[in-house]
Image (spheres, rainbow, N blue to C red):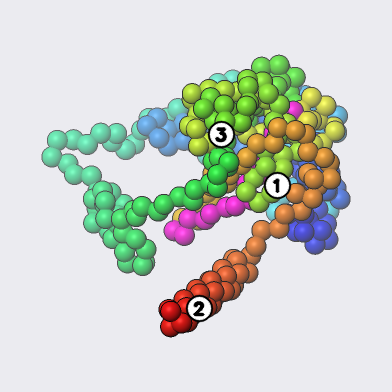
């Protein structure tokens, strides 16, 4: 990521908070929060068709602006006025609502407007439902996948196993926070100010870890967490895994409450697998071990410079290793034959 940042001619960051990325920006455009701005309308088909929108509850603070305002102003400065033939988002919303028999004035009063459904919700007796598949049925064997050369049925893939002393890194969410965006909010901070590391008591016993012990994490590639977190011993996690809530371990000093609170799982996720069919990323295939003493700043910085091997380099390295292994094996077999001949 750092290399990609260094290669950019210009970096513009739009954010509501001074997140870490703002420190790398040439230009920061402060955005108003969702409680301070209008947002585009939302149309829901579902069981009960409806339209809704979000309007500001309070005035925007300081010089923050909504994203639509930034786009419009930049467009005008670039001579693209014809693409923004409206004064503000309220004008756009009013036009949108009028297309379905409402108005901005009405929506400001009611917030959500429902409409009668024009499609049947349930199947009537004797009716068949056709699914969006080649056969029109629920397919346990995907004919579409088979036609495209993929496995038509799921095949079991054995997951990687951690080395001794390492554990599956599992992360999740806390209901008080939204990703890594709200940890500096004073009200939400009071509810949940930091994360901790869930460890099974049997695993903790092997390491001499007790409840509320301070610890750091190091992953399979040597990357060390910048901050520590306290241990939480619980049977709610398996002995071969550890769990932590995502969104903590912020480093920006302007996040006055959130900075230095807990461990950030993101730097520890250096190994990512991609689903070949739908392109989804699997990130819970990293492993970590415990550091019970505080690492030096030099160790943390050095570990952050970890560079993942490119797929081609990795394959070449593996091939080279296999060749070396075969050569060693052949040499051992030849030596064994000579020993037999001597005897």
- Classify residue 26 as left or right of residue 306: right
Residue tagged by mark 1? 223
Residues tagged 1 and 3 counted as in contact (Cβ below 8 A): no
Residues tagged 2 and 3 counted as in contact (Cβ below 8 A): no
Residue closest to the far front: 343
Residue tagged by mark 2? 335
Residue tagged by mark 3? 242
Asked if residue 10 is among those painted magenta in the image, a careful observer would answer no
Inspect this view and state whether residue 257 appears.
yes
Estimate how packed mark 3 is, as few (under 14), some (14 to 19) or many (20 or more) residues with alpha carbons within 10 Å: many
Considering only vertical position in the picture, is 303 above or below 332?
A: above
Q: Position of residue 116 (x, y in %)?
A: 38, 30
Considering depth in this image, is 82 or 244 the residue closer to the camera? 244
Name the residue rendered at 49%, 51% in the picture.
Answer: 160
**Mark closer to the chain start, 2 or 3:** 3
Q: Quadrant of the image for the C terminus? A: bottom left
Considering depth in this image, is 203 or 252 the residue closer to the camera? 203
- Separation of disc 1 and disc 3 at Cα? 16 Å
- Separation of disc 1 and disc 2 at Cα? 42 Å
Inspect this view and state whether residue 53 appears.
no
Name the residue rendered at 40%, 35% in the picture.
Answer: 46
Considering only vertical position in the picture, is 331 above or below 14?
A: below
The range drawn in magenta is 261-277
Considering depth in this image, is 69 or 199 the residue closer to the camera? 199
Q: Position of residue 75 (x, y in %)?
A: 77, 53
Q: Secondary structure at mark 1?
A: loop
Q: Nearer the viewer, mark 1 or mark 2?
A: 2
Name the residue rendered at 53%, 71% in the picture.
Answer: 325
**Mark closer to the chain start, 1 or 3:** 1
Estimate how packed mark 2 is, as few (under 14), some (14 to 19) or many (20 or more) residues with alpha carbons within 10 Å: few
């Amino acid at each position: 990521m750092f290399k990609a940042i260094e290669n950019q001619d210009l970096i513009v960051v739009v954010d509501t908070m001074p997140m870490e990325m703002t420190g790398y920006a040439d230009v920061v455009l402060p955005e108003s929060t969702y409680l301070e701005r209008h947002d585009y309308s939302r149309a829901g088909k579902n069981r009960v068709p409806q339209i809704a929108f979000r309007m500001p509850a309070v005035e925007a603070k300081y010089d923050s602006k909504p994203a639509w305002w930034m786009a419009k102003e930049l467009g005008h400065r670039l001579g693209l006025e014809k693409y923004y033939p409206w004064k503000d988002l309220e004008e756009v919303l009013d036009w949108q609502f009028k297309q379905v028999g409402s108005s901005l004035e009405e929506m400001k009063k009611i917030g959500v407007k429902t409409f009668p459904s024009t499609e049947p919700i349930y199947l009537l007796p004797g009716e068949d439902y056709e699914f969006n598949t080649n056969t029109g049925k629920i397919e346990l064997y995907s004919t579409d996948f088979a036609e495209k050369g993929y496995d038509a049925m799921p095949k079991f893939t054995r997951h990687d196993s951690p080395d001794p002393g390492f554990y599956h890194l599992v992360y999740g969410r806390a209901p008080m926070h939204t990703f890594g965006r709200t940890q500096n909010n004073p009200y939400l901070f009071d509810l949940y100010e930091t994360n901790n590391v869930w460890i099974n008591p049997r695993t903790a016993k092997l390491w001499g870890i007790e409840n509320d012990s301070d610890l750091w994490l190091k992953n399979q590639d040597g990357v060390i967490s910048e901050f520590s977190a306290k241990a939480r011993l619980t049977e709610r996690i398996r002995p071969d895994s550890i769990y932590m809530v995502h969104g903590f371990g912020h480093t920006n000093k302007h996040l006055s409450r959130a900075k230095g609170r807990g461990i950030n799982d993101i730097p520890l996720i250096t190994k990512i697998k991609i689903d070949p069919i739908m392109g989804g990323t699997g990130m819970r295939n990293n492993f970590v071990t415990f550091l019970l003493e505080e690492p030096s700043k030099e160790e943390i910085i050095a570990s952050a410079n970890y560079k993942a091997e490119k797929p081609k380099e990795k394959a070449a390295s593996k091939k080279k290793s296999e060749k070396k292994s075969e050569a060693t094996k052949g040499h051992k077999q030849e030596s064994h034959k000579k020993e037999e001949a001597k005897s």
